[in-house]
Image (cartoon, grey):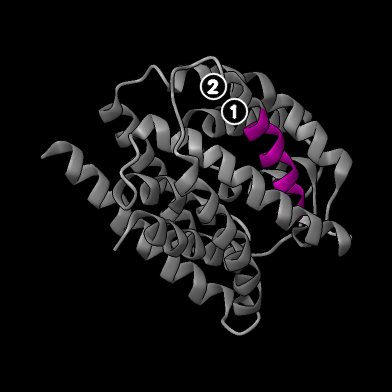
Amino acid sequence: MTAPILALIAGALVGLALGALGAGGSILTVPALIYLLGFSPAEATTASLVIVIVTSLAALVAHARAGAVRWRAGLVFAAAGLLPAAAAGVLSARIPATALTLAFAGLAVLAALRMLRRRSSQEGGTVSVPRAAGAGAGLGAVTGFLGVGGGFLAVPALVAALAVPMSAAVGTSLLVIIANALVALAARATTAVTLDWALIMPFIATAVLGAWDGRRLSTKVSPGTLQRVFGSLLLVVAAAMGIGVLL
């Protein structure tokens, strides 16, 4: 199977997960780029930022049309993460491939455990500016360093720290993710990492299309089932990445 075809398939799967789950689906992008398309960890985390920006923007438009984005809360949250995202973006390209891969495997385990744990859909309480600033900075650093959107971290943080209702948390998290990813990508422009656009473009195209199919899938399958399936898949991916580095 040729690399462009693999890129089309991988993009469709990532988009499907992103559309079905709303938050956390893009974390499959980096391992797909590394193990299916042969990207180095530094190349994969940089390319992932491009893919995250485009797919999140497409999803943000849909949420905005539905009135499910809290713009002020999202911009406040994003502002706290811009500097950490830029610093982490520069640092990531200078980290050894082994350390970067292990860090991503650890993040995948965290995402999987959050998905597998049953969570209630309670609304946020009172607004906490310090908590919002801390969570925003942490999310920015994760986005810049590992090239992932971090929606699985942003959504509960928005609910808990800024009292964003669950009905608007996913859409608002997309705004935060786009802002952080844009800054991190700009910071990486000064590094020596090169991107294979012949593989990135078909990946993006099918990811966007897959996201729309994922939204339809989410109306037919219960959220709990989707989270359990995706969480189990992430644990397998994390284990494979860790074993591959250590052996």
The location of residue 146, given as percent across then percent down, is 46, 34
Q: Secondary structure at mark 2?
A: helix
Distance in Å between CA atoms under marks 1 and 2:
5 Å
**Dots 1, 2 in contact, CB < 8 A:** yes
Residue under label 2, please give it: 188
Residue under label 1, please give it: 185
Q: Secondary structure at mark 1?
A: helix
Query: Vertical placement of 51 versus 20: above or below?
Result: above
- Residue 164 seen anywhere in this rendered image of the structure: yes
Which amino acid type corresponds to the residue marked 1 in the rendered image? Leu
- Locate residue 244: give its quadrant: top left
The kind of secondary structure the magenta stretch mainly shows is: helix
Q: Quadrant of the C terminus?
A: top left
The location of residue 218, given as percent across then percent down, is 62, 76
- Residue 149 seen anywhere in this rendered image of the structure: no
The location of residue 7, given as percent across then percent down, is 43, 56
